[in-house]
Image (spheres, rainbow, N blue to C red):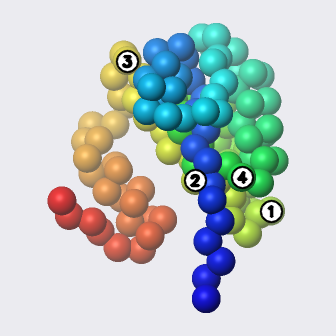
Amino acid sequence: MINIRHSEIAVIGDEDLVSGMRLAGVRRYRIISEGDKEEVRRALSELFDEPDVGIVVILEDYMEYVSDLIAQAQERKASPPVVIEVPSKYGTRYKDVTQYYKAYIRKFIGFDIEV
């Protein structure tokens, strides 16, 4: 039998993203001032060390600051939290967001999901 543990969702973002996620029920969050690279890195490191965090939602704009931390966590932990990047209110850098998220899901679960 597979041991399923309860995992929480955490969010790292600006006030708008965090407010929206809190309305959806997310209780763990860090509001980051615009461009505070060190605060983003510190927040993600702390969340990676918490055993009950299973998903971290982070602004797409912050991914450039933490891509090395994510790679390190994936190497050292058997099951690190899944990091999901979401576009900011100013838009996204991906040409086709739908294709990006389909590829992301395929990477994590091994097959496509059609809705």
Q: Earlier in the sequence, mark 3 or mark 2?
A: 2
Q: Secondary structure at mark 4?
A: loop
- Front residue of this view, candidates 11 and 2: 2
Real-space Cα distance between discs 2 and 4? Answer: 12 Å
Res. 64 visible in picture:
no
User: Around disc 2, counting alpha carbons within 10 Å, would you say few (fewer than 14), some (14 to 19), or many (20 or more)?
Assistant: some
Residue 63 x/y as whole percent: 57, 34
Res. 52 visible in picture:
yes
Mark 2 — residue?
A: 82
The kind of residue tagged 2 is: Val
State which mark lies toward you, 4 or 3: 4
Q: Secondary structure at mark 1?
A: helix
Q: Secondary structure at mark 3?
A: loop
State which mark lies toward you, 4 or 1: 4
Real-space Cα distance between discs 3 and 2? Answer: 22 Å
Mark 4 — residue?
A: 52
- Front residue of this view, candidates 51 and 70: 51
